[in-house]
Image (spheres, rainbow, N blue to C red):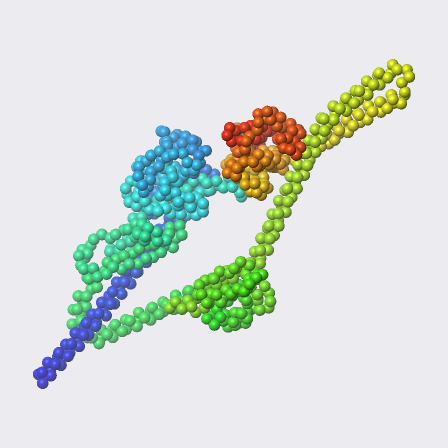
Amino acid sequence: MSKFKGREWLLFGALWLLSSLWVLAQWGSGEYRRLQDSFEQAAHQAYAGVARRLDQNESVLSAINALLISHEQLDAPALSAFAREMLPRYQQLYAIQFLQNVTQEARAEFLRNMGERFGETFYIRDYGAEGKRNWQPAPARPQALIVSMIEPDLPAFSPVYGYDMLGDPHFSAELKRAVASGQKVSSRPFELYDGGGRAYLLMQSLYRESAGEARQGRGRDLAGVVALVVFCDRLLQLPEDQALPAGLDLSLLPRDGRAGGEPLYQRLHRDGDHDWWPKITRLTLRLPLNSEAQPFVLGVEQDIRLNDLALLPLLLREVFIALLLSAAALIYSQRVALRRERSQADEELFLQSERASVTLNAIHDGVVILRQDRRIEMANPMALQLVEMPADEVLGLPCHEVFRLMGELAAEFSEDPISECFRTGQAVELAERMQLTTARGKVHSVEGGIAPLMSRDGVQIGVVCALRDMGPLRQRTAAALEASETRVKEHLEKLSHVARLHTMGEMASGIAHELNQPLTAISNYCQAAIQLLEGVEDAPPQVNSALKLAVAQAGRAGEIIKRLRALVSKRAIETRLIDVNQVVGNCMFLAEYDLRERGIEVVQLLSGYSIPVMADSIQLEQVVLNLLSNAMDALKDEPALKRHVIVHTRREGKKGILEVRDTGRGITPDLLEVLFHPFFSTKPHGMGLGLSICQTIVEQYGGLISAENIPASGACFRIELPLALQAERQLS
């Protein structure tokens, strides 16, 4: 009996030990899940704080951009006042900089202005953020983005003024992307100049409308780049008003996986009193931050140590609490948690379904979901409009009974893209000029793609068809192309008409000049013959009458030529305020085909400012096209690599200058003096009126045209016209 009782107690002890171990294991597992849930909650709270700071960065940069773009020039006091107000409010902002765009032409003026500002010799510098890290004078570059303003303006930051960040390889790629896209772009992190830690730049380019073109919506000038210096350590600082675990380690990682996944910056927790306990595991979470301009991933890590599991209270409590009660409580808590999780999952599923439904109904692409048996499971309103059938008739039908996809004018058999997607399990992009034929026989030109629909296990359960009707777009494109061709045709007709009028004028002037002399000589000879015949008694009277008639007809011919010349030369000229830069742009468009066919490269060095003159746009275009034609003729015998034409416009005092240069063999000195004479030509079949007409057009607007040879470069034709600055101001 005693032995039985011993066995009974042994069995009871074994059962109790097993139950205790089971409860201990369950408690440890639940404790681990609790720590993991707590870690994930803390990670998402930290994520919310960092994401909010990223949004703050972009909001501040947008506000600065709006502040600066509303002024015609950089308003440094307003930017400084705004920066002093923002920097104390947002702890992650270390400084605000303005990088001024300085071209090679404006370099001297920029250095002079900065020298007057600092009261000393100012020079542009290179530093090397990740290289030598020493200041040195920067060489002259075609374009530079130079630090011209820093807030707060501390004495320690004085060496940074003049820093050409576009010349630094660490920043140049992101700066060029910011200038090209006009969007917010962040740089790679770097060590601060004063050794205060690691930071990165959040940049956005600042454009302003070009002078004289703002009314027409054309031409924008790069003023510079606004950059926020974001302090990484403060960006990752945990909020003090939230009870977050002290053992969290935060890090910034690149979203695209560059640098081998190594962190761009880490903020590690300080060692605590419990760090001597053995480490069980390390929890890790990667949370992509929802910012296109600041493409980072927030890494959150925490060490789980033995004392975090709180097992000692469990051991004491297990002595006094019944196994059944513990099991019941555990089951109840699990059911409550399961019910709560199920409710949350149902709510999230409903929200996701609702968002997907609203999105599909709002987009302008037709979306059709097909099941594995190729029957239609869902079709959004745009798809129903495309197939011209109501939803109750479409759902459940095989897709081939509703629509078919086939290539337009296909010359050979090709697989249906839907069948190809089902067969390969890969996304299929629709070929160009794909046609959708509805069940009622209507044909639409569509584009888009077919993508496989997968289950959680990776098994294909259907496909998604995204289709866009290209018919309206093609109609709009055709209409726009037709309108553009009409405008070009009308413009060319105007040019041709003006060219014919000027040719007639020059021909009339030349003919009058050449024929007046022989007509005058004929008249003089006839009058002399009449005088000689007056002393001859037996002179026939018919000869005297014929000579008088010849004198009268010669005078009549001279009057006809004089009236013809006056008629052509006194044509009314329609002058208006035009921009020489726009005239050059029109001519480049009209001559683009000829230049490309002859393999000639055109370099346009146009003035950053408008060049207003009072003239007829068509006549000036005729002059520029004539000079371009002469330049193309001069380059026809040159090698392909030496065929260049340079068109340069600029302001010089009260004159606007237009130069057309070529890289040909130039003009011989003996031809420079007679180059603009009428009927002089170096071309075998030329009439010699082109440059003469150009001279007439330019001089009638108070201008001057000249030609010269540039050593080792070719010929240069230079047009000078008076600027119409007063008329420009009145229109402004």
* Residue in view at x 79 percent, y 25 percent: 555
Using the image, determine if residue 212 lies above or below residue 38. above
Q: Where is residue 577 in the image (x, y as percent from the top left)?
A: 60, 35
Q: Quadrant of the C terminus?
A: top right
Given the current orientation, which residue lies at the most extreme left position?
2
Q: Can residue 380 be seen in this view?
A: no
* Residue in view at x 77 percent, y 21 percent: 521
Using the image, determine if residue 283 lies above or below residue 622. below
- Numbered marks: total: 0
Q: Position of residue 331 (x, y in %)?
A: 27, 73
* Residue in view at x 59 percent, y 34 percent: 630
Q: Position of residue 524 (x, y in %)?
A: 79, 20
Given the current orientation, which residue lies at the most extreme top position?
535
Apparent side of residue 15 relative to residue 370 in the rendered image (left or right): left
* Residue in view at x 19 percent, y 74 percent: 19
Q: In which quarter of the image is the N terminus?
A: bottom left
Given the current orientation, which residue lies at the most extreme bottom position?
1
Res. 121 image quadrant: top left
Residue 519 or 165: which is nearer the viewer?
A: 519
Apparent side of residue 506 relative to residue 76 in the rendered image (left or right): right
Q: Can residue 479 be seen in this view?
A: yes
Apparent side of residue 45 relative to residue 498 in the rendered image (left or right): left
Residue 455 or 553: which is nearer the viewer?
A: 553
Q: Position of residue 503 (x, y in %)?
A: 68, 34
Apparent side of residue 555 relative to residue 709 in the rendered image (left or right): right
